[in-house]
Image (tube, rainbow, N blue to C red):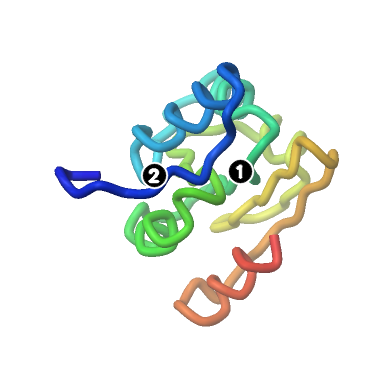
Amino acid sequence: MHGVPNDYNGPRKADLLVRYLRKFVAPDVSIIESNSAIHQFIESAGKEFPIFIGFGLNESVVVEFARKYKKKAWFSIAKDFSEEVMITYDFDKVPALVALHSKYNEQSVFYGPFDGEFLEDFIKQN
């Protein structure tokens, strides 16, 4: 990585290797601009990793944790979304951080406080 050799501990089958590499080269935090982009992001992220979507959050709130947990989760910030999205992802106020586990069909919502310790605990638990 960045000119320094790293051991590869990821999957060995072609389709899983492609997913792993796509995750590896993706931005730390993806910025999502619309309802349809939210659904596309979730679909393209797949079911292998948990997905964290910040609604009404500033990117700077999650960027530290996105870098730290990049190999374990997807992180994104939704800039523009409707009430329909709030209903779909079961949160009723902003700012909110929604954790989705498509593989297990689970989700949880975090309303803050969005400072280091509390936010990291939420991310670790999900």
Q: Which residue is mark 1?
A: 51
Residue at 46% x, 34% y is 23
Cβ–Cβ under 8 Å for marks 2 and 1:
no
Residue at 42% x, 55% y is 66
Residue type marked 2: Val
Residue type marked 1: Ile
Q: Residue furthest right?
A: 105
Q: Which mark, residue 21?
A: none
Mark 2 neighbour density, 10 Å: few (under 14) some (14–19) many (20 or more):
many
Relative horizontal placement of residue 30, taking residue 111 as reference (left or right): left
Residue at 67% x, 51% y is 99
Relative horizontal placement of residue 125, taking residue 52 as reference (left or right): right
Which numbered disc flags the more N-terminal residue, 2 or 1? 2
Q: Position of residue 46 (x, y in %)?
A: 64, 27
Which residue is at the front of the view, 22 or 113?
Answer: 22
The part of the image, by quadrant, that contains residue 103 is top right
| SS at badge 2 | loop
Spatial CA distance of label 2 from label 1 is 11 Å
Count the labels in the image. Answer: 2
Relative horizontal placement of residue 121, taking residue 8 as reference (left or right): right
Residue at 49% x, 25% y is 34
Q: Quadrant of the N terminus?
A: top left
Q: Which residue is mark 2?
A: 29
Mark 1 neighbour density, 10 Å: few (under 14) some (14–19) many (20 or more):
many
Q: Position of residue 73 (x, y in %)?
A: 55, 48
Above or below, comparing residue 64 to residue 77 in the picture: below
Which residue is at the front of the view, 82 or 66?
Answer: 66
Q: Residue furthest left?
A: 3
Which residue is at the front of the view, 110 or 82?
Answer: 110
Q: Position of residue 50 (x, y in %)?
A: 65, 46
Above or below, comparing residue 26 to residue 50 in the picture: above
Q: Quadrant of the C terminus?
A: bottom right
